Image (cartoon, rainbow, N blue to C red):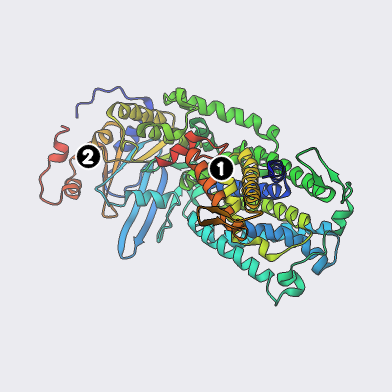
Amino acid sequence: MADSRIYSAAALSARAALAGVEPEPGVLKHDSILHVKGVERHFGGITAVNVDQLDIQRGSITALIGPNGAGKTTLFNVLTGFDPPDAGKWQFDGTEMSKVSAHKMAVKGMVRTFQLTKSLTKLSVIENMKLGAIDQVGESWWNALFPLRWKAQEAIVEKRADELLSRFTMGHMRDEYAGTLSGGQRKLLEMARALMTQPRLVMLDEPMAGVNPALKQSLNEHIRSLRDEGMTILFIEHDMDMVHDISDWVVVMSEGRIIAEGTPAQISENTSVIEAYLGAHQGNTMFEEKH
Amino acid sequence: MDWIRIFENTMRAFAGVDAAYFALAAIGLNVQFGYTGLLNFGQAAFMACGAYGLGLTSQYFNVSFWWGIPIAMVLVIILALLVGIPTLRLRADYLAIVTIATAELVRLVVRSVKFKRIFGGSDGINTFSNEFRALNPFQPSAQYGIWPFRYNGYTMFTLLVGWGLVVMIAMFVWLLMRSPWGRVVKAIREDEDAVRSLGKNIYSYKMQSLIIGGFCGMLSGMVFALDRGSVQPDNYSRDVTFYILTALVLGGMARVMGSIVGPMMFWGLYVFCDNFLRQLVQSAPLRVGGVTIIQSTQVGAVNYMLVGLGLILLMAKRPQGVFGNRQEMALDGR
């Protein structure tokens, strides 16, 4: 892949940290922020997720790819507490998370977005954003009755929300209902809202689905800039251009298992990945075009 | 036809005790359904908690009437936990089913012969309001107010208490809904999972909303019981919940003013139609050609038809209610 882009310092250090890692499923990273061990999720007789080990490098952009039904979203749901696992443990920054309920994940610094965008349509864009801030005094019903107790914090939250909105070029929409936004703008809003929780790990479930090409480019830039600010990004994506473009590391799932890991270049050459996508002995056109 | 009489009665109903206790219950439903999206079809049960909280003071505990307030609060919390714990983790429909069943259960328990000693059976309780009557600053038999809003002394007193509570509770809800707490519950109405992913314990917020709305229902039941001077189990049946819900939709959901003006309009419309029909058939049944359209015994039923028609027309013209926001309403389809 001809690569003439200028990398940020964070990108270079993430790539350097991953350079020496063996491209094998479940391989341990030098500095992991999320460590998953033996997570299983069954639906009746179907094993949706069966991950022996998964390590996510801190400060990297990791892509989670795989054919439809590979269990990517189910793994997300399990890791973020939305779906109880049948077995397994995972640690986030050294904290055991397998017993933590979904609403405490964001408080601990791990936030997710959804494949089907969940913008809160009857709230304005700025209210959507302010909802994201955690530890708000005025969110207790008793304190809510005394505006003096929460007005100061609210102003700080609003300032941060406005900054994030203008960074995502949505400042002009701040007072519109979120329900009036386009699909792509909703994706942006959801990502910006997730950032209001001040996370260390951002988990994006198909951030590019239904987004027009122009907006895709700017979403890419936004995701890169998050890493440059020190956040770790784990995202599910089907758009291979994007995966090649921005990820430092790629994890491939198929039928609930992790079948391959490696840098984007290593994954393009991995025959088991091509087989998973296209079925065995089906040729190797999928990644060839990129070279 | 005595139009002045009809006008007087309509105006009196518009600002009457019925409108006040409906408004209190509607504010509660508005917190639960309008803001949080909790489909509570059992507001009548929370009203019964308030009324029986007062009734139990004289019937069972034999204590001062003022104990009715804490007793009723405990009953409300028990009821809210009872219906909320199993259902609030599930989809909204389950709460609707459970609340409608629970409200009937509550009514059947309090009117049962088995518990007659505690709840007074189907006769209800009517011995609790003496202390309240003693507080009345007005002459019970005299007329007060300015035309057309003229009421007797006791009604004037319950009106003052009722509308006073409406103003207080409306302020309370208004403060809540413009705070970060209100933002969270409104967001829960839109999408629970999104709110959960942003670090809010939605189960707790839904429970808080259910209890706060229940307290409003409780006050409503108290005002109603004090005005009538008695607690009757059959005053807390399903239709009460649905009339209140109707009044709320009429006024406009998720608006504080909507839940106050809606009940006023509901009762205004109801009494206007009732008075009009009664006067129409006072002397003789209404006939067109050889066909009897309506006679005096049918006024009650036809009245509901007319009120229903009026509501349908209003909803066709203003689906968002009087105070609702049409733009907000239109977002539902997306």
**Residue for point 29% across, 26% down:** A214
Question: Of the numbered discs in the image, which one, if any, rests on residue A276?
Answer: none
Q: Quick one: SS at disc 2?
A: helix
Residue reaching furthest to the bottom:
B114
State how far apart marks 2 and 1 are (Cα): 57 Å
Nearer to the camera, A115 or B322: B322
| Quarter of the image where the N terminus of chain A is located | top left
Question: Foreground residue, B56 or B292?
Answer: B292
Return the residue at label 1: B253
Q: Quadrant of residue B99?
A: bottom right
Q: Please, which chain is the residue tagged with disc 1 on?
A: B
Badge 2: how crowded within 10 Å, few (<14), some, or many (20+)?
A: few
Q: Position of residue A184 (x, y in %)?
A: 35, 32
In-image side of A279 versus A5 (left or right): left
Q: Amino acid at mark 2?
A: Gln
Residue B242 image point, x, y percent: 57, 55
Q: Which mark is residue A266?
A: 2
Residue A157 coordinates in the image, percent (x, y) = 57, 30
Does residue A271 lie above or below B85 as drawn? above
- Whether residue A90 is visible to the viewer of this picture, yes or no, is yes
Q: Quadrant of residue B57?
A: bottom right
Residue at 72%, 40% (x, y): give it.
B167
